[in-house]
Image (tube, rainbow, N blue to C red):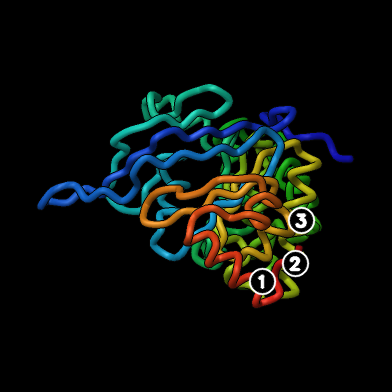
Amino acid sequence: MTAPAPGGSPGGGELRIEGLGVSLLRASGDLPVLEAVSLLVPAGQTAALVGPSGAGKSMTAYAVVRLFPVPARITAGRILLEGLDLVQLSERDLVPIRGRRIAMIFQEPGSALDPVMSVGDQVMEGIVAHFGRRGARERAAEALGRVGLDPQFLRRYPHELSGGQRQRVLIASAVALGPSLLIADEPTAALDVTVQAQILDLLSRLVRELGMSLLLITHDLGIVAQMCDVVHVMRGGTVVESAETRQLFAAPQHPYTRALVAQAQRLGLWRM
């Protein structure tokens, strides 16, 4: 087993969100998009965040790293990473935590990668920012190796890669610093079924090998059943149900969750 990269946390990083509120900043007045969101990603485990488009799943992830794609602000609640409240941190104090303790994989690898930068430069970017240039290329090569790409990929550019290879590069960049918490926002949405399975297997292996916790954002209950320990169901900007995966599928409590599970059973995504 490969040893965790520097910065990792044995047993993974517990993430606890309590009563989170987020509003979009508008000239006509702030617009609430998240209200009283509470969830737990247990240390060293995989938690799913599921729900329809517009439920607030990605906005919740953006709030954790405080990198909103649109003008927004946290209005309430706490975001605790291993007991540290990230909401109370200044931007200056949060910078060293991003990447090194929390890493995020975005939905579209094609748009997340810079087309004019080599793979090596992009994987090394975070390494250099946190640890300096010495040994950065070797560490980047090691990160690529973790995701099944050999060192020749350091010299390649995104347009030379398949969709699955681009996603592996993003994962390599995310794990290069040995974060204790990894957030994956629909990491297989743009991939075909065969490549989806490979990427999910890769994420599961990395969680085990690196001792990370994983917050997996998805709409696919088949994926949830396959690899998640706990599930949080979102609708309308809040979490409506949380449970261990088997418990949630066996006895969903909220009407929306019951509808999701029934649909998954009809499609053959889940069998008791």
- Crowding at dot 3, Cα within 10 Å, few <14 / some 14-19 / many 20+, comes out as some
Q: Residue at x 18, y 47 (%)?
A: 30
The image shows residue 5 at horizontal and vertical percentages of: 74, 35
Query: What secondary structure is marked by label 2?
Result: loop
Image side of residue 16 versus residue 202, left or right: left
Q: Is residue 61 visible?
A: yes
Tell me the tag on residue 202: 3
Q: From the image, which quarter does the C terminus lie in?
A: bottom right
Figure check: 42 above or below 153: above
Check if mark 2's residue and mark 3's residue have beta carbons within 8 Å: no
Mark 3 or mark 1, which is nearer to you? 1
Q: Which residue is mark 1?
A: 265
Figure check: 231 above or below 41: below
Q: Residue at x 67, y 49 (%)?
A: 247
Image side of residue 240 versus residue 161, left or right: left
Q: Residue at x 50, y 22 (%)?
A: 84
Along the polypeptide, which appears first: circle 2 or circle 3?
3
Query: What secondary structure is marked by label 3?
Result: helix
Q: CA distance from mark 2 to mark 1?
A: 6 Å
**Image-quadrant location for residue 78:** top left
Q: How many marks?
A: 3
- Crowding at dot 2, Cα within 10 Å, few <14 / some 14-19 / many 20+, comes out as few
Figure check: 47 above or below 112: above
User: Which is nearer the eye, 141 or 6?
Assistant: 6
Check if mark 2's residue and mark 1's residue have beta carbons within 8 Å: yes
Q: Residue at x 49, y 65 (%)?
A: 111
Q: Which residue is mark 2?
A: 271
**Please, what is the three-letter code of the amino acid marked with disc 2?**
Arg
Tell me the tag on residue 111: none
The image shows residue 8 at horizontal and vertical percentages of: 69, 31
The image shows residue 191 at horizontal and vertical percentages of: 64, 72
Q: CA distance from mark 2 to mark 3?
A: 24 Å
